[in-house]
Image (tube, rainbow, N blue to C red):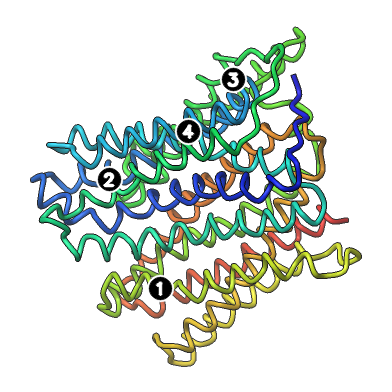
Amino acid sequence: MPITLQAKTTNRTAILAVLLTGQFMANIDTAVANIAGPSIGADLHASEGAVGLVVSGYVVAFAVLLITGARLGSSLGYRTTFLLGLTVFTVASLACGIAPEIITLVVARFIQGAGAALMVPQVLSGIQLHFQGRDRLKALGYFSIALSGGAVVGQLLGGVIIAADLFGTSWRPIFLVNVPIGIALAAASRRVLPADPTGERDRLDLIGVLTLSTAVLLVIVPLLLGSERGWPTWSWICLALSIPTLVFFEYGERRTAARGGRPLIARQVLGNRSVRAGLLAHGCTSGTYFALLFVLALYLQDGLHKGPAYSGFAMVIWVAAFGLAGPILPRLPREIRSMPVIGCLVLAAGYLAVLAYLLLGGHTGPLLFALLGIGGLGLGISANTLIGAVTSSMSPQYAADLSGVVATNAQLSGALGVALAGSTYAALATDPGRALSVVLAGFVVLTLVGAGAAHRLVR
């Protein structure tokens, strides 16, 4: 049953605040464990590989189950699924914070990622259902800030909390802080989010869930773990197996549609040329952003021997510039249809400016961070307008499908970007400046490809 729920104007600000708080929490926990890794290993006497699973287990579960979470939002209702995901996330955060040994922590992080995967797709679904026109563009501006800001705040917050060593608890508060926030957010969600409409619900395609989850797993695991292990044989086998798995998924989806059933992803969504062009453009741009977070940290910490706090603060100007796009875009004339293209080009200009700075002998300092701000503004413009164009290209009945596809596309693009950029940087790491320059040159090419796809979208 398609959802046509519309909230009263007076309640929409509260709805947006609740949804974006959930998004912000999920994004913080994607990044915060990276900073805590050494402390976790020392405290729980865990190996480097086990600590790596604490980080990657969350990301794997999150990426694999995003589309399933989106479809559950369509089947159960987005309010119900958001609360379910928030509850799972909060309980798992408590389990992480009190974990007595590394296996418990790894399992709890996987469950935490699954909770985030149920919660996060409902954020974009809610924005599509409750906001239209310029109001949706404003809401997407704040949504983009939650996406970008959460990752940077996670790095900053992790470093500050661990350094404070509150009551001798070391890394544990980075997870425990989610518990009171999660409880308060659940209470606010029950009060603010409108009840889901009653009536007949779509049945969940369990075979499609299993097949697509397997395919995403076969892609995301080697991308996350294969590059740092020198691309062992198993990583290539997994990537190769993902292709027939996706073919089998597509076959199953076609059969389900032919029998009159509801496929896991509506056929109309992936068949829409505007959606495909928008996903390509968004994947190219967001993939470079995730990769930049990873590679810039390597450059500053391993290459220039700066501390983790310095590395985190280096992205503050980027996020601040990113946030400017939110209030700026709704004030621009409606006739400017090429803003997705402009955003991609500004992002490319930002990467090109940083590349030129490095080639001219610069290393770090205020000018580097200011130039990164150009890229942040470009990413903010492109992210807001691309997501807005994609979600506006189809009717609200496809809100859940679009939400799951957009979120999964960003996660897979980010993992691919980190794998490629990380491998390239590692191969040239003896000269950090040259390594970062080569990676930035690749970012320029990708963002220009994104600009081409964005042009097809707006055309």
**On screen, residue 392 above or below 359:** above
**Nearest-to-viewer mark from 4 and 3:** 4
First reached walking from the N terminus: tag 4 or tag 1: 4
Spatial CA distance of label 4 from label 3 is 17 Å
Q: Residue at x 36, y 51 (%)?
A: 227
Amino acid marked by disc 1? Ala
* Residue drawn at x 44%, y 58% as measured from the top left: 151
The kind of secondary structure element at disc 2 is helix
Say which of 351 and 326 sits in front: 326
- Point out the tag, 4 or 2, that comes first from the N-terminus: 4
Q: Which residue is mark 3?
A: 248
Kindly state the secondary structure of the residue where label 4 is placed: helix
Snapshot quadrant of residue 202: top right
4 or 2: mark nearer the eye: 2
Q: Which residue is mark 4?
A: 64
Amino acid type indicated by mark 3: Phe
Is the residue marked by circle 1 packed among few (<14), some (14-19), or many (20+) residues within 10 Å?
Answer: many
Q: Earlier in the sequence, mark 1 or mark 2?
A: 2
Q: Nearer the viewer, residue 203 or 18?
A: 18
Q: Is residue 404 above or below residue 378?
A: above
Report whether 310 appears left or right of 116: left
Q: Secondary structure at mark 1?
A: helix
Mark 3 or mark 1: name the one nearer the start of the chain: 3
Image coords of residue 326 (percent x, y): 67, 64
